[in-house]
């Protein structure tokens, strides 16, 4: 900044700072202490102010210098005051100053009556993010299962969302499957937390090229450890054993017997836990399940079972009798077989459904039951767990529950029977397989 001219007040003059009258010879204003020696020369020509706030006529670093206070001879003199007019002027917007910017205090723009203040303790509002700089959520790897509730959290192996903790519907809560000549439906029911039933349906070709159709249904024993794993292992192993034996020409009844033994071995293997695991869970028992299966092949109807899951024969012509093809391994069945109770009394007892035979490492001596039939008319085989037959126990009740077109629509028939159990209360898991039996005329297929 350039040096200002030294001058004193003249007669009749006023203070440039407060416009108070001055006396001749005053060096400072007696009212405000204005340094009269700093009064600019009375020239209308003002230097141009550059964008950086420095005068075009001043040295490059002049804008950064403060005015030099003049020396004073007496300590009684007031401290020199520097007014806004003593400093370089630059608009906040970076533009040229207003014409009167150097004449005195600048006029301020009108201010609002109130200024909005943040609530006490409220965090400052974040600056809006540049959308170009925001990283999108990474795409989860293929096959990742997302939560059905929040749609963002991943599901852990126990079936719960890692984000919101929501329990996920289990795949086995409701299952349906249909092949050309067999169908099955399994449902958790209305009272159980999970479905511990399992099924397997398949078909294979016999050595002569004729079809063999298979249905396996298993019911996990709820009082055992990991019943759902037991039923799943048993159904799969029995089905695979049959698909291996039947094409090799093994008689269907013998194949069924071997399949039950193979299923028992699969369930027994689940109990082979490390010693440390048993120490941490000393009260666990061996996994267990029941099994019932049916094969339709070469005009034969074969059934096999262990436990209290059942198979029924329901003819298309309902004037013919419906027949239960299996006998339960249960307390009630033993009482009836021994002549100690009639059927109504036995099944009214609270011990009625206690099973006396099952697949599992802690089962009694395993005795697979098998039977072979040769129906003389068309019909369907209903293979089911007690989740269904508890609501249609008598053969007449089962005949009324099975739709008349079951042989033509096996999946629909299985759905209807599961609905019948749910309408009855759905107290247990319910699984039904429908296996149509078509009567082959004598001599058909021979060349």
Image: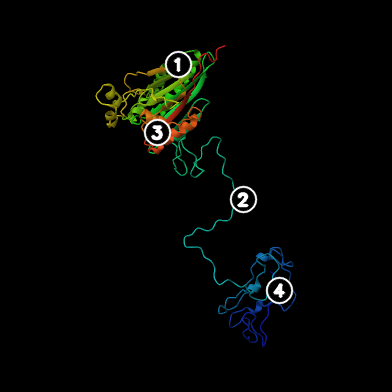
Residue occupied by mark 3: 429
Q: How far apart are marks 2 and 4 (CA)?
A: 43 Å
Q: Is residue 418 visible?
A: yes
User: From the viewer's perspective, is residue 291 above or below residue 113?
Assistant: above
**Could you say which is closer to the camera, residue 438 or residue 353?**
438
Instruction: Name the residue carrying label 1.
Output: 252
Q: In which quarter of the image is the N terminus?
A: bottom right
Q: Position of residue 73 (x, y in %)?
A: 60, 78
Q: In this view, does 69 lie above or below 400?
A: below
**Which residue is at 58% across, 45% downward?**
136
- Quadrant housing the C terminus: top right
Residue 188 location (% of width, % of height):
42, 35
User: Which residue was labeled with disc 4?
Assistant: 99
Specify which label sits upstream in the sequence, 1 or 2.
Answer: 2
**How would you rate the neighbour count of disc 3 (Cα within 10 Å): few for under 14, some for 14-19, many for 20 or more?**
many
Residue 302: quadrant of the picture = top left
Residue farthest to the left, as pictured? 340
Label 4 near label 2: C-beta < 8 Å? no
Q: Mark 2 points at which residue?
A: 131
Residue at figure coordinates x 43%, y 34% from the top left? 418
Tell me: 425 left or right of 84: left
């Amino acid at each position: 900044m350039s040096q200002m001219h030294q001058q004193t007040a003249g007669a009749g003059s006023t203070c440039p700072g407060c416009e108070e009258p001055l006396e001749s010879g005053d060096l400072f204003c007696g009212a405000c202490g204005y340094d009269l020696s700093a009064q600019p020369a009375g020239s209308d020509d003002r230097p141009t102010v550059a964008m950086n706030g420095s005068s075009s006529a001043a040295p490059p670093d002049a804008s950064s210098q403060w005015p030099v206070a003049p020396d004073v001879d007496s300590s009684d003199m007031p401290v020199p005051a520097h007014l806004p007019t003593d400093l370089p002027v630059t608009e906040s917007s970076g533009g040229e100053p207003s014409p009167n910017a150097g004449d005195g205090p600048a006029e301020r723009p009108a201010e609002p009556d109130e200024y909005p203040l943040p609530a006490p303790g409220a965090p400052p509002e974040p600056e809006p993010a540049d959308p170009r700089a925001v990283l999108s959520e990474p795409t989860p790897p293929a096959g990742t299962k997302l939560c059905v509730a929040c749609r963002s959290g991943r599901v852990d192996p126990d079936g719960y969302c890692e984000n919101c903790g929501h329990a996920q519907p289990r795949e086995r809560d409701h299952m349906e499957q249909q092949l050309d000549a067999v169908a099955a439906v399994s449902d958790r029911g209305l009272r159980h937390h999970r479905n511990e039933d399992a099924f397997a349906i398949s078909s294979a070709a016999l050595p002569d090229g004729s079809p063999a159709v298979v249905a396996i249904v298993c019911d996990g024993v709820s009082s055992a450890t990991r019943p759902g794993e037991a039923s799943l292992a048993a159904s799969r192993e029995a089905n695979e054993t049959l698909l291996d034996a039947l094409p090799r020409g093994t008689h269907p009844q013998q194949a069924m017997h071997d399949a039950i033994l193979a299923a028992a071995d699969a369930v027994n293997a689940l109990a082979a836990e490390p010693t440390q695991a048993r120490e941490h869970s000393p009260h666990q028992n061996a996994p267990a399940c029941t099994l019932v299966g049916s094969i339709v092949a070469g005009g034969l109807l074969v059934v096999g079972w262990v436990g209290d899951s059942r198979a029924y024969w329901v003819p298309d012509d309902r004037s013919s009798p419906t027949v239960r093809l299996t006998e339960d391994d249960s307390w009630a069945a033993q009482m009836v077989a021994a002549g100690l109770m009639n059927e109504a009394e036995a099944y009214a007892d609270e011990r009625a459904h206690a099973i006396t035979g099952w697949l599992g490492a802690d089962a009694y001596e395993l005795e697979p039951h098998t039977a072979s039939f040769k129906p003389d008319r068309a019909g369907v085989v209903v293979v089911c767990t007690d989740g269904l037959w508890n609501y249609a126990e008598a053969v007449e009740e089962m005949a009324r529950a099975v739709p008349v077109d079951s042989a033509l629509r096996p999946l629909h028939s299985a759905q209807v029977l599961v609905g019948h159990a749910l309408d009855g209360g759905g107290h247990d898991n319910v699984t039904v397989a429908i296996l149509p039996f078509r009567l082959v005329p004598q001599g058909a297929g021979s060349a």
